[in-house]
Image (tube, rainbow, N blue to C red):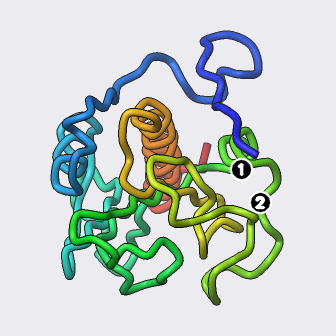
Amino acid sequence: MTGTIATTSTGPASLWHRRAVLELALADVADPMALLRAIEGRLPGIVTTQASGDSFLFYDPDGVTVPEARFPFCTIVTGDRYDAASLLDRNPATYRVNVGVDRPAYEALFGPAPREAAGYGVIDTGSDYTLKDTLLPHPVYAPLHWLCVVDPGDHTRAELATVLERAHAVARRKYDNQRSRTAGGSAV
C-alpha cells in the first residue's frame, strides 16, 4: 500500500510543508555520496557521522549536542552490516537510504505501522525489501515510522525529497523542543 504525502499550503494537508527546499535531480541519487552531498547542501543544520561507508545524518545546527545524545533522521547504508533484508551486498553500487518520519507521514504512505517491536529482526510488512527505486517501509524500524528506498532513482527521487524534508522538519522540531526545555523554557 503506497500513497503520497500531501504538500498543499492550506487545510489539514499542511501539516508541515510550505514549499519544497530539497529537490533531487537524477544525478543527486546516482550514488550514496551524491545523495549525501545533496542533502547536506540543501537542508540546513545537518551534522554527519560516517562509519564503514555508511552515513548518519543528524539535525544539530549549533554542533553542540554530544554525539551520544544525537539520533539520526536519515541514514545512508551501503552494505548488509545492520540487516540483510535489502541484499545491499549484491552489488557494490547498491545502497539504501533510510528516513525516519512522523506518524502522519508514514501512515499517508503505508497505512498504520506494524505493531511489532522494532530492532529485533526483519518485519514482515508484505514488502519486497530488495526492490530498487521503490519507497518501502523500513525492514527493521517500520514500527518507529521509518521508511527506505534501495537505489533511489527517477521513480522515487521527488517523493524521497519530500520525506527527507519532512524528517528534517521533525528533527528540527525535536531539537528546538529539547533546547527549549534545557534553557528553562517550555517545549512547544
Q: How many marks?
A: 2
Horizontal side, residue 59 vs residue 185: left or right = left
Report the residue at 53% width, 77% height from top. 85
The three-letter amino acid code for the residue at tag 2 is Ala
Relative to 126, does residue 14 appear above or below in the rendering? above
First along the sequence among labels 2 and 1? 1
| Mark seen at residue 86 | none
Instruction: Please name whichever residue, 81 or 119, is drawn nearer the observer in this view of the structure.
Output: 81
Point 34% across, 30% down: residue: 22
Residue 22 in view in this figure: yes
Q: Residue furthest front?
A: 90
Q: Position of residue 35 (x, y in %)?
A: 24, 47
Q: Residue 118 falls in which quadrant of the image? A: bottom right
Compute the Cα span from label 2 to label 1. Answer: 8 Å
Name the side, left or right, on which 66 lies relative to 173: left
Label at residue 113: 2
Residue 158 versus residue 36 in the image, above or below: above
Residue 144 locus on image (x, y percent): 66, 66
Contact between marks 2 and 1 (CB within 8 A): the answer is: yes
Does residue 183 lie above or below 83 as drawn? above
Q: Quadrant of residue 21?
A: top left
| In-front residue for pair 110/117 | 110
Task: Residue 91: give x, y in percent of width and height.
Answer: 27, 71
**Residue 57 picture location, percent across and down:** 32, 60
Q: Residue at x 68, y 62 (%)?
A: 127
Q: Which residue is mark 1?
A: 103
Mark 1 secondary-structure assignment = helix
Left or right: residue 154 compared with residue 173: left
Q: Secondary structure at mark 2?
A: loop
Quadrant location of the C terminus?
top right
Question: Looking at the picture, which amino acid does disc 1 mark?
Answer: Arg
